Amino acid sequence: MIGERLEIGLRSVELIWTQVELPAAYARAPDPAILDRVATFQSVQHALYLPLGLSVLVGSVLGAWLFATGRSLDRVIQIVFVLNALRNATRLLTVYAGWPLFPAAAYDAAYFALVVAFYGPVAYWLVKRDAAGPAAR
């Protein structure tokens, strides 16, 4: 729960301050100090995303393990969690360890497809799980 709040806070500051307010201030008066503020925020954001990414990685591994029920429907969610763990691990190793497993350009190009690949099967699993009734739970 803390991770989600931190993520929302980071994204809100990023949107309002670094994408709206600071560019408008720089357009009015191109002060290099404004660029320093953006760089400082990016450094703080980079540092905070390490524990966030690690918690998502641990959660995905636990999710894959917890849904090892043997039910075919639960294999859908297991695959989603495993793929998310792999995506997250490669991204963390690229960004924080310097191993070029998932470089920024490739990640940016694949991001939307990864979102669909994650949330599409999750939606399917949720709908089918609810439709199957209590026996499938």
Image (cartoon, rainbow, N blue to C red):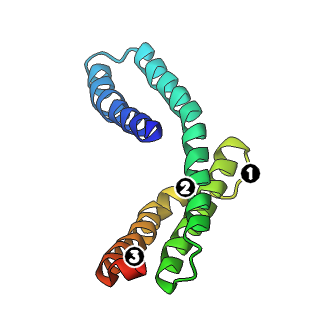
Q: Are marks 2 and 1 in contact (CB under 8 Å)?
A: no
Q: Are marks 3 and 1 in contact (CB under 8 Å)?
A: no
**Is the N terminus in the top left, top right, bottom left or bottom right quadrant?**
top left
- Dot 1, crowdedness within 10 Å: few (<14), some or many (≥20)? few
Q: CA distance from mark 2 to mark 1?
A: 14 Å
Q: Amino acid at mark 3?
A: Trp
**Quick check: 23 above or below 84?**
above
Residue 105: mark:
2
- Dot 3, crowdedness within 10 Å: few (<14), some or many (≥20)? some
Quadrant of the rendered image containing residue 83? bottom right
Residue at left offset 69%, top offset 50%: 93
Q: CA distance from mark 2 to mark 3?
A: 31 Å
**2 or 1: mark nearer the eye:** 1
- Residue 77, position in %: x, y? 49, 72
Quadrant of the rendered image containing residue 47? top right
Task: Determine which residue is flagged by label 1.
Answer: 99
Task: Determine which residue is flagged by label 3.
Answer: 125
**Left or right: where does residue 74 sit relative to residue 14?**
right
Q: CA distance from mark 3 to mark 1?
A: 34 Å
Viewer-closest of 32 and 49? 49
**Quick check: 41 above or below 4?**
above
- Residue 63, position in %: x, y? 55, 62
Secondary structure state at the residue bearing disc 1: loop
Q: Earlier in the sequence, mark 2 or mark 1?
A: 1
**Left or right: where does residue 37 sit relative to residue 134?**
right
